[in-house]
Image: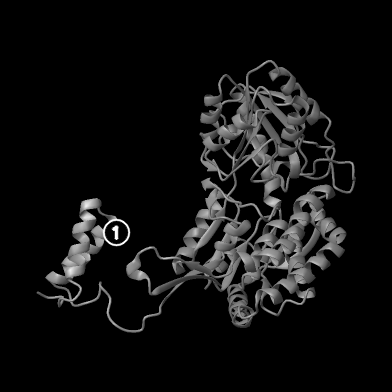
Amino acid sequence: MVSSKTATLQSINPATREVLGEFPIMPRLAVKEAVEKAWKAYEDWQLLDYSKRGRLILKLHKILARRADEIAALISSEVGKPLSESYSSEIMGTLDTCVWLADNAERLLSDQMIQLSNPLLSTKQGVVAFEPLGVVGIISPWNYPFSIPMMTMLMALMVGNTVVLKPSEKSTLIGIKIGDLFKEAGFPEGVVTIITGDRETGKILSESRLSKLIFTGSVEGGKKVMEQAAQNLTPVCLELGGKDAAIVLPDAPVSWTARALVWGAFTNCGQACASIERVYILKGKKTEKIIQAIVDETKALKVGPCTDENNDVGPIIDEDQRQKVIDHIEDAKEKGAKILTGGKKLEELQGFFYEPTVLLDVNHDMKIMREETFGPVLPLMVIDSEDRAVELANDSEYGLCASVWGRNLRRAENIARDLNVGTVLINDCLFSHAVPQLPWGGLKKSGFGRAHSQFGLMDLVNIKHINIDAAGGGTRLWWYPYGRNRQKRIRGGVQIFHGSFFSKIKGLFDYTINIFKKPKA
């Protein structure tokens, strides 16, 4: 929340509406100074070898592990998620990333030698080097306010970039904590800089002199960031959310599938870009059992603040987001959807709580099946055929993740290959974002670019080709001067390497006979 009188931000606990802190909205000059400071730090940081950067990251790893309880408590208080989720979805993946980078980054980014197949290029040696870009700007969201920026920052830093992070205005405390942790680990001044503020602050950062800008947020936010970054032709990586579909095959185990779908829909109160927001159940003998199991699992969830360790689902982040969830549910009800459980605000609780809700009899005319809801709602649709399920799953502006559920793994994999998304999980959901070895990113309005894994590392480096010619003398067939004899020789070379059998023979004759002739006839 923004305080206009004082140009500050207030951090609000969504479970209690308590003000946790107040922070400055940094003006343009302060943001520009932060970016220039990062460029200055880059001059020395890029020169460190991987082992020295890795040692700092492993030192940070020890601090994170030692302070895990403190960090988890801060995450849960500022964005409302249960402590169990703060440990599993925010801290574990960050710790794994530290170790994976220290063990593998240098190997994955070592120089590559390129073999040239054309004998005319035999004197040449091709080298591909992977070099840091410079200053990377990161604008991170509130829903995973620790793991999303941290995993990206660690990768950017390991390859030799410096980072300026602008955390969401709804999770400023966590952003400041991230900066403190890097400082405690001994990272040099300016290598990691945190700027606080609102959308205008993000705009200033987007328009600054950056080598890359990484944004995670809404589609509309991504469009604006892309437009702002275009002023300097700054390359961007956008992760913009999803409307992730689950396809349940008739042979899917009832209890396992129901528990997984419920977790996939309601973890983080449904506020994940990879939340299961659509379920297509193929009609079969167990259809009713699966639906009932989903309802039973949902009813068993305990909703409330993270201060109670037995609570499963926390609050929605604020009233605006809760109202969007309500609007989607009301639209579905008006168009014929049936509420199987949930569907109400929890007025007795002080924060922005809403009952986990399961809907049936939904269709693609409803907002709940087309727009990203980002809340605790699980719409179910019973489908007659596998082809129809795939068609509907692909009928979306988004293409981030999907899941397929069933015992026949070959059948499930075949379906997975037909889904137009960046990630398909078979018999699980959501977990892969916290695994540093696995790529993350989507298609269509889910954005572009990849985070994590070796492919994410490639997004954070300049892939430089260096070509070395060892001859140091003579001429080259493709150099000047041109002429009839040179043309015959080149044409002969084309046929030698790529023509038919008889063309190769003629090409060899033309090439050889013109070797000693002057280029011009």
**x and y, in percent, of residue 354 in the image:** 76, 37
Identify the amino acid type marked 1: Phe
Name the residue beneath numbered marker 1: 497
Local secondary structure at mark 1: helix
Q: Quadrant of residue 450?
A: bottom right
Q: What number of labels is visible?
A: 1
In the figure, is residue 491 to the left or right of 36?
left
Relative to 197, does residue 430 appear above or below in the rendering?
above
User: In this rendering, does residue 445 appear at all?
Assistant: no
Name the quadrant of the N terminus.
bottom right
Q: Residue furthest top?
A: 285
Which of the two residues, 326 or 361, is positioned nearer the viewer here? 361
**x and y, in percent, of residue 224 in the image:** 51, 57
Q: Residue at x 64, y 79 (%)?
A: 45
**x and y, in percent, of residue 282 in the image:** 62, 22
Name the quadrant of the C terminus.
bottom left
**x and y, in percent, of residue 291 in the image:** 72, 23
Relative to 35, does residue 243 appear above or below in the rendering?
above
